[in-house]
Image (cartoon, helix red, strand yellow):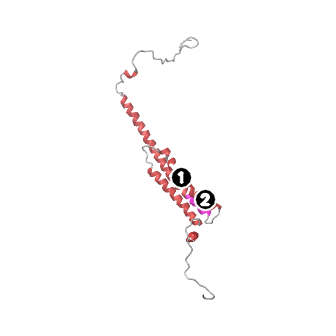
Amino acid sequence: MDKGKAVMGSARRWAVDFTDNSTSHSSRDILDPPGFTRASQEQDDSAVSKQKKDAEANWKSQKAWEVAQAPFKNLFMMAFMMWMAGSTVHLFSIGITFSALLQPINALRGVGKVFEPYKDNKVDLLAPKLVFIALNLVGLGLGVWKLNTLGLLPTHISDWVSSLPPPQDVEYSGGGIPL
């Protein structure tokens, strides 16, 4: 059966043969039609790709700022939870307090990984990173403040009595018979 022939032997009406059997030059050797230049098409493609890159850089910058401001929402939630836990030392208040301490510490340890997806030559990540670090330091300070209100930080002189040297005797007294 010949290529392009139907089963019944009649040719297919709309079949197109794309094989190139000619010995002519390539399509690059053919002149462009009047009013068309390949350079202008390449410039249009580069302008569109530049716009896409700018839009992507803008999107990455917006997302980086959203990630940087995310700890702000966590601050109010954590402050409310610590207020609800009260100021007495018990299991729940200690658990909430150590959670308030560990979350910012872990976030500060992973700053590079958090902003990794938004790294680009056109996106400045310094300001979002600094805001992220500052908000996590505020969260860490909130946890330390809660430790202090629970009385778990050694801030009074009585907490350090065991490390103080014994006082020197100022006077001596004796009783009974003088010698």
The amino acid marked with disc number 2 is Ile
| SS majority, magenta | helix
* Number of marks: 2
At 64% from the left edge and 60% from the top edge, which residue is drawn? 92
35 vs 68: above or below: above
The amino acid marked with disc number 1 is Ala
Name the foreground residue: 43 vs 119: 119
Query: In the rendered structure, which disc, 1 or 2, sits on the residue that comes first in sequence?
Result: 2
For label 1, the residue is 107
Label 1 environment density (alpha carbons within 10 Å; few <14, some 14–19, many ≥20): some
At 54% from the left edge and 61% from the top edge, which residue is drawn? 142
At 59% from the left edge and 57% from the top edge, which residue is drawn? 99
Can residue 77 be seen by looking at this rendering?
no
Furthest residue toward right: 91
For label 2, the residue is 96
Query: Residue 47, how many percent across, how many down?
Result: 39, 36
Q: CA distance from mark 1 to mark 2?
A: 17 Å
Q: Which residues are magenta?
A: 76-85
Of helix, strand and loop, which one carries label 1? helix
124 vs 30: above or below: below
Q: Are marks 1 and 2 in contact (CB under 8 Å)?
A: no
